Image: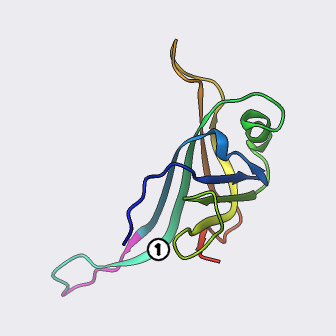
Amino acid sequence: MAKMVLTNAYISVNSVDLSDHIRAIEFDNNVDPVEQTTMGDAVHNFLAGLKNQTFTLTFAQDYASGEVDATLAPLVGAAAFVIEIRPVNTTVGATNPKWSGNVILTDYGALGGSVGDLHEAAATFQPGDGTGIVRATS
């Protein structure tokens, strides 16, 4: 199995390619445990409940038209939109899967930082239509 260094990811938010501004990507794909332990069990037993999926992205902030802020600011509180993320900015395939889905923007830090630091903007996305974020290789 090949190892890789994440250096050229693909990020599309609401059909806008923001790949050249991405600094960090985190995808949490969890499931809520639902306890089903009954009398006579020697250990706690669980079923897989609802998924809890979250994309957290950190961008180098840019206020120009068609860039980070112009794309993200209108999406706070808006209806669901499409997001797509790939490890490498090339064709989707077995060694370059994509994660995509209809999401809502639940947190957007449009302004923040310390003197002398790169101006960054963090954004958090979660499923917005009940279908969740799915992984595909084609």
State the residue position of label 1: 49
Q: Measuring 65% from the left and 52% from the top, which residue is drawn there?
A: 11
**Quadrant for the C terminus in the image:** bottom right
- Is residue 116 depicted above or below 95 in this figure? above
Where is residue 111? Give x, y as percent.
Answer: 63, 24
Q: Measuring 18% from the left and 87% from the top, which residue is drawn there?
A: 40
Tag 1's secondary structure?
strand
Direction left: furthest residue: 42
Magenta stretch, overall SS: loop
Where is residue 9? Give x, y as percent.
Answer: 58, 53
Where is residue 75? Give x, y as percent.
Answer: 76, 44
Side of 13 relative to 34 (left or right): right
Residues drawn in magenta: 33-40
Side of 40 relative to 134 (left or right): left
Where is residue 55? Give x, y as percent.
Answer: 56, 53
Front in this rendered view, residue 135 or 96? 96
Q: Quadrant of residue 108?
A: top right
**Quadrant for the N terminus in the image:** bottom left
- Does the segment drawn in magenta span residue 89? no
Q: Quadrant of residue 15?
A: bottom right
Front in this rendered view, residue 99 or 88? 88
Callout 1 amino acid: Gly
